[in-house]
Amino acid sequence: MSPRKAVTQELTQEMVLKAARDLFHQKGYQQVSMRQIASVLGYSHGAIYYHFKNKADLFYAMIEKDFQLLNDLIRKVSDQNLSDEKKLTELFLTFIKFGLTHKSQYEMMFMMTDKEVKSYVLEGPNETYQVFASFLMQWSSRELNIQEIWSVFLSLHGFVSHYCRREETYDQVETLANEHVNFILKALG
């Protein structure tokens, strides 16, 4: 048995999450193993199990950070000194900008179909939708029903999903994003 090699720094959760995110993005969830993540980091796979009980647990931790970031960005809109209509505009654009600025994260958050992680990733989308829906109801000029709120969310998700798999950045489609948001706002009229 060879002696354990000395490491230059202690393995942290953040290091594992970053390496895993890169590998999941490159290869897809199913094609990545805990051993591969450890290998990229130069550690034994046992070191990763100190931080996460399995790959799904690691994925869940990664996605929860992403949902928290999106929820925080959405909540920041409420702190702005804007009219309700402008807050709605900012809410919708914030959602689009997050999705197109963090494409791989967005895909993993909202578009992952893997059965192993699907059960892990139920709470995040629901919480984000609740935060989104509560602000939409609060700032809307009229009372919205559940179907209307869901339609707005799906419309924004559809826009983001379309551009997630393309090369354009948010800056390149910002004009289209604004037009899409204005279209939704008119429909809510």
Image: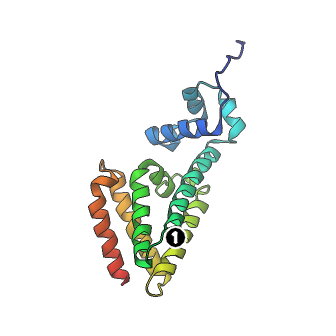
Q: Provide residue 54's location: percent of width, then percent of height.
A: 66, 42
Q: Residue at x 68, y 41 (%)?
A: 52
Left or right, residue 80 beside residue 61: left
Q: Quadrant of residue 182?
A: bottom left
Q: Residue at x 48, y 50 (%)?
A: 105
Left or right, residue 174 beside residue 94: left
Q: Is residue 17 above or below residue 145?
A: above
Q: Is residue 147 above or below residue 161?
A: below
Q: Residue at x 39, y 64 (%)?
A: 93
Which quadrant of the figure contains the N terminus?
A: top right
Left or right, residue 184 beside residue 91: left
Q: Is residue 67 above or below residue 10?
A: below
Q: Provide residue 40's location: percent of width, then percent of height.
A: 54, 28
Q: Residue at x 53, y 68 (%)?
A: 79
Q: Quadrant of residue 85?
A: bottom left
The kind of residue on which mark 1 rests is: Ser
Q: Nearer the viewer, residue 16 or 31?
A: 16
Q: Nearer the viewer, residue 57 or 88?
A: 88
Q: Provide residue 44's location: percent of width, then percent of height.
A: 65, 26
Q: Provide residue 133's location: percent of width, then percent of height.
A: 51, 74
User: Mark 1 falls on what kind of element?
Assistant: helix
Which residue corresponds to mark 1?
78
Label total for image: 1
Q: Nearer the viewer, residue 27 or 77?
A: 77
Which quadrant of the figure contains the C terminus?
A: bottom left
Q: Nearer the viewer, residue 170 or 38?
A: 170
